[in-house]
Amino acid sequence: MKITFKTLNAVFAFILLAALTVSCSKKSEMDKFIDSLLSQMSVEEQIGQLNLHSMGFRSSAALTDDNETVKAVKTGNMGALYGFGGDPATMRKLQEYALQSPHGIPLMFGMDVIHGYQTIFPVPLAISNTWNREMVEKSARIAATEASSSGINWVFSPMVDICHDARWGRIVEGAGEDPYLGGEMAKAMVWGYQGHDDVFSDNEVLACVKHYALYGAAEAGRDYNTVNLGRQEILNNWMRPYKDAAEAGAASYMSSFNEYEGIPATANKYLLTDLLRDEFGFDGFVVSDATAVAELVNHGIGDLQEASARALQAGLDMDMNSDGFIGTLKKSLDEGRVTKADIEKACRRILEAKYKLGLFDDPFKYIDEEKVKTNIFTPENRAFARELARESQVLLKNDGVLPLSKNARIALVGPFANNASDMSGAWAMSAKASDNVTILQGVKEALGTSGKLTTAQGSKITAQPIRGGFGVGFTRNEGAGRGPAAPEKTNAQLIAEAVAAARAADVVVACVGEPNSMSGEGSSRADISIPDVQVELLKALKATGKPIVMVLTTGRPLTLTWEDENMNAILNTWSLGTESGHAIADVLFGDANPSGKLTTSFPRMVGQLPLYYNHKNTGRPHPDFEPYRKFTSCYMDVINAPLYPFGYGLSYTTFEYSPVTLSASSMPVNGKVTASVTVKNTGKYDGKEAVQLYIHDVYSTSTRPVKELRGFEKVDIKAGESKTVTFEICSDDLAYYNHDLKWVCESGDYEIMIGPNSKDTGEPVILTVQ
Ligand code: NOJ
């Protein structure tokens, strides 16, 4: 048969219709099933489905009849449990108890699987530095496979909160400051966890997008703090990742701790219903953050009963750890404070999630005694973790000292050199410190019998032990002795040992930074420099005159002004997870060429915060690198430019960008053009480059940022080779929410820029929208 365009169209139309019919009939089957189930359930049982508790135990021995969780599960007073996976016997038992409840509704099992399950990947902020959608998706895919093999069917990830303020410890959990890039990473993560369709196979799990909404805008970077931003601002610069995740099909959201417009997010109808459901099209369920319903009382919007009723009516479906819904909704129903329909709506959404997971067909689908042994922490997963960890590192400075020769005499010093537990990063609940490859181990293996390696701890991490927090960021501290030794020696003694090692070496590799516990939840800092005791070490090393490569472990951008002036190279490794040591050695010795680029600006000093590249121009703009001038928008004591800008990162090779060409210099409002650039690898190493497209609306009815990222591509370019990268630009890429909160593409001139980072975007070309 001759295949014409017309026949192809007919075939596509048929397939589309068939797919739609299958999906509609599946939906109607689900609706019928849930309608019938809901009609049989008592209101108490429906409220029971809205209840989520932390499991609080890891072994079936704790599952005694007087255990409160057991009682709640058996009586149908629990919709889901969260905490830990990996013990099929415990999970099987709990599921059997759930099946004994009046209508035998199975439980969901949730967990904070944030950057891998047991194969720990780099922290989310680090993986966003890859600018590599495919790798990010694959990391979530592997996390889903490991988590689902351990009994988990719902992961509390991705965290997509935009953040402009590195004081906030939770900046480590997200993808940085840019809404477009954040949206791309959010979609990749959702697809990685859930797949690309609405069928959940047994290695796909529900994603939970958090923290909805605007948690990363907490005032002054102080955790849980108030958010004060206008609606136009949030729609343009903060909400996009949440919206993109909904469009990618995310099955659940978690409400955030902060308030917005005077109403805590957990009870905020504008956020939970008007935006999330009505505007973004989300149709799954929303769970509160842990104890967030009870915390509404502290926010001051009512007692637990009032707070619970308001949260339900605003669009919250499940209450995590507050016992607000389970404890008060029935009373509120009796008093006419909430309706049966409110409760039924929330319950339906939770039953739908269970239905989609396939739990009504097979409540034990995710509980498998074999898979838990074979699918977790496999050599393949570790190999990918190493690849991802290579690509997440950002080379911030290099005067030519890197890559190191394997024949050099190397002094590997600092409190992170032989430190396994702090390689995991914050929020790595199933990590085992003993699984992590230390930097020392990685470097030793890379050297084999070549070169000469000496090592010393060199310093404590902080002068005083860090109090409170989550210890080592949830990493199980197995493998004692694999973190820095208890500080029996004074810092001066530790420094003296490192200095002696440095004197006998050709080059020093100084491993410094923040431990896991200094970022993540409840770990805001007002001073974001490297702790003083470690800076003392760097200063003493500097005094030896030896070249120093600083290897930085951190969960947030730090102020590195002194380090930038005094170190020969700075390799920002964030926290790279299980394969840290191998991946760092790969980059140090040039077996991998660094290609990571920052997704957060690094300030010169903390007083510049909040800091982000896509700021407004103001009426009195001040050039980023110029010194102070009175009556312009600048500081007396520091220039406006960040130390390292958004999108920045060095390579061992160099790339040259051609001028940008447009396929047409104008387009109608609903048209399309392409923008192209040719990138040449002008150095000696093969490399990967994240090519970035920025736009700027020259005149518009509302003020627009000086630049906005609207596209990126990560390309492999061999030494000496050139590649042309082409971006399609349509009206949606130029549009924004105007003053009336309408999504519009206004006619007029737009500057189109393509470059290696947000600062070096070259000569803009003008695209006119008619
Ligand atoms: C609090 C955190 O804010 C959230 O990210 C996490 O998912 C829950 N606790 C559950 O651990």
Image: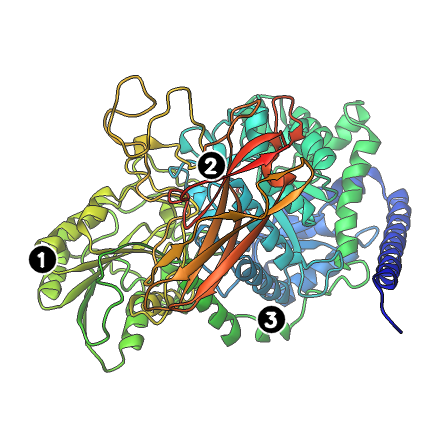
The residue to which callout 3 is attached is 372
Q: Residue at the location (21% across, 62% down)? A: 401
Looking at the figure, which quarter contains the N terminus?
Answer: bottom right
Instruction: Name the spot of residue 212 as percent of width and height, x first.
Output: 59, 38
Mark 1 packing: few (<14 Cα in 10 Å), some, or many (20+)?
few
The residue to which callout 1 is attached is 545
Q: Nearer the viewer, residue 168 or 653?
A: 653
Q: Earlier in the sequence, mark 2 or mark 1?
A: 1
Which residue appears farthest toward the top when viewing the image?
Answer: 631
Identity, as a three-letter code, of the amino acid under mark 1: Gly
Q: Is residue 193 above or below residue 186?
A: below
Q: Nearer the viewer, residue 518 or 555?
A: 555
Mark 2 packing: few (<14 Cα in 10 Å), some, or many (20+)?
many
Instruction: Name the spot of residue 303 as percent of width and height, x first.
Output: 62, 23
Secondary structure of the residue carrying numbered label 2: loop
Secondary structure of the residue carrying numbered label 1: loop
What whole-number distance in Å separates the C-alpha atoms at marks 2 and 1?
A: 41 Å
The residue to which callout 2 is attached is 707
Asked if the residue at tag 3 contacts the one at tag 1, i.e. Cβ–Cβ closer than 8 Å, the answer is no
Image side of residue 765 versus residue 463, left or right? right
Disc number placed over residue 515 in the picture, else none: none
Residue 352 in sight in this render:
yes
Instruction: Name the spot of residue 51 as percent of width and height, x first.
Output: 69, 43
Q: Nearer the viewer, residue 277 or 424?
A: 277
Decide if ligand 1 comes within 8 Å of the CB at mark 1. no
Identity, as a three-letter code, of the amino acid under mark 3: Val
Query: Which quarter holds ligand 1?
Result: top right
Mark 3 packing: few (<14 Cα in 10 Å), some, or many (20+)?
many
Image side of residue 247 versus residue 407, left or right? right
Q: Residue at the location (73% across, 40% down)? A: 281
Identity, as a three-letter code, of the amino acid under mark 2: Lys
What whole-number distance in Å separates the C-alpha atoms at marks 1 and 3?
A: 52 Å
